[in-house]
Image (tube, rainbow, N blue to C red):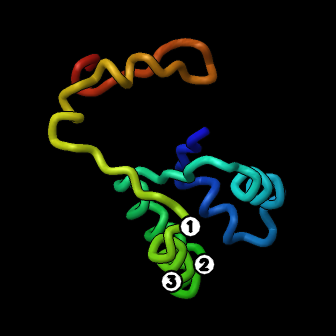
Amino acid sequence: MTLLIDAAPIVALADPAEPEREAILDALTEETGALVIPAPTTAEIEYLLGQRFGPRARRAFLADLATGRFSVGNLERADYANERHFRTVAPLHGKTFTLVPADA
């Protein structure tokens, strides 16, 4: 399976006091499929790590990207206009996502 990763778990890994740190680390290391971070999320992660934990954490994350620990998911120009893919994903709360600007 491919695991799509948001900023929160990556930032949480940098915090030794994070109570879910071991569970996050286990989930990432046990996943046999690709670990994918969306390209815009990499900038968010890099910023948050720098703000909360300093340049060492930022460099460690960038090193992980450079070594291929995570794949960076990029959208093609046509993907931004093709919202049907996003409409097939159901959020955990069971309703639907609001897609902007289409649903605004």
How many residues crowd mark 3 within 10 Å: few (<14), some (14–19), many (20+)? some
**On the image, numbered disc 3 is attached to which residue?**
59
Determine which of the numbered discs, if any, sits on residue 69 in the image. 1
Please give the name of the residue rendered at 50% of the width and 76% of the height, measured from the top-left corner. Answer: 67
In the image, what residue type sits under mark 1?
Arg
Q: Nearer the viewer, mark 2 or mark 3?
A: 3
Please give the name of the residue rendered at 28% of the width and 27% of the height, measured from the top-left corner. Answer: 100
Query: CA–CA distance between discs 1 and 2?
Result: 20 Å
Query: CA–CA distance between discs 1 and 3?
Result: 14 Å
Image coordinates of residue 24 in percent, x first then y, are 74, 54
Please give the name of the residue rendered at 60% of the width and 78% of the height, measured from the top-left corner. Answer: 53
How many residues crowd mark 2 within 10 Å: few (<14), some (14–19), many (20+)? some
How many residues crowd mark 1 within 10 Å: few (<14), some (14–19), many (20+)? few
Q: Earlier in the sequence, mark 2 or mark 3?
A: 2
Q: Is 36 positioned to the left or the right of 78 in the image? A: right
Mark 2 lies on a secondary structure that is helix
Q: Quadrant of residue 77?
A: top left
Mark 3 lies on a secondary structure that is helix
Q: Earlier in the sequence, mark 1 or mark 3?
A: 3
Q: Earlier in the sequence, mark 1 or mark 2?
A: 2
Determine which of the numbered discs, if any, sits on residue 53 in the image. 2
Mark 1 lies on a secondary structure that is loop
In the image, what residue type sits under mark 2?
Phe
Q: Is residue 45 above or below residue 102?
A: below
Q: Is residue 68 above or below residue 94?
A: below
Q: Nearer the viewer, residue 91 or 72?
A: 72
Image coordinates of residue 83 in percent, x first then y, are 28, 23
